[in-house]
Amino acid sequence: MSARPNVIEKVSWGAWLIPTMGETTLETIDELLKGSIEETDDADISYKLRSARQLIDVVRMRHEEVDETIEEVQLDEEILENLRELGYVE
């Protein structure tokens, strides 16, 4: 992979070099795939990389759905706790 200024910063952590780009792992993977698409002239490889980016979007949407569900469940637990304190439920 060619070096790109201001796109990939490498942070040394023990024996590992960790690329830091996006705020999340999915964003980092997406940026790496995007850069690879831009660097390749092979249509088959480009197709596979674009497909991988689409799968990253699916995973991102599923994560957002899970996060929303967790927030709703936590809210429901708070409501149940309040109802318990008021003596409405046990």
Image: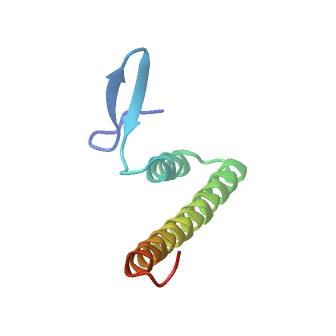
Of 81 and 61, nearer the camera is 81
**Residue 56, image x, y percentages:** 58, 58
Q: Is residue 7 above or below residue 61?
A: above
Question: Quadrant of residue 9 in the image?
Answer: top left
Residue drawn at x 72%, y 51% as measured from the top left: 44
**Residue 31, image x, y percentages:** 45, 50
Q: In this view, does 8 lie above or below 51?
A: above
Seen in the image, is 27 located left or right of residue 57?
Answer: left
Give the farthest residue toward the bottom.
88
Residue drawn at x 64%, y 53% as measured from the top left: 46
Of 24 and 80, nearer the camera is 80
Q: In this view, does 11 lie above or below 89?
A: above
Give the farthest residue toward the right.
44
Question: Quadrant of residue 6 in the image?
Answer: top left
Residue drawn at x 43%, y 14% as measured from the top left: 15
Give the farthest residue toward the top.
15
Residue drawn at x 48%, y 33% as measured from the top left: 1
Seen in the image, is 86 located left or right of residue 55?
Answer: left
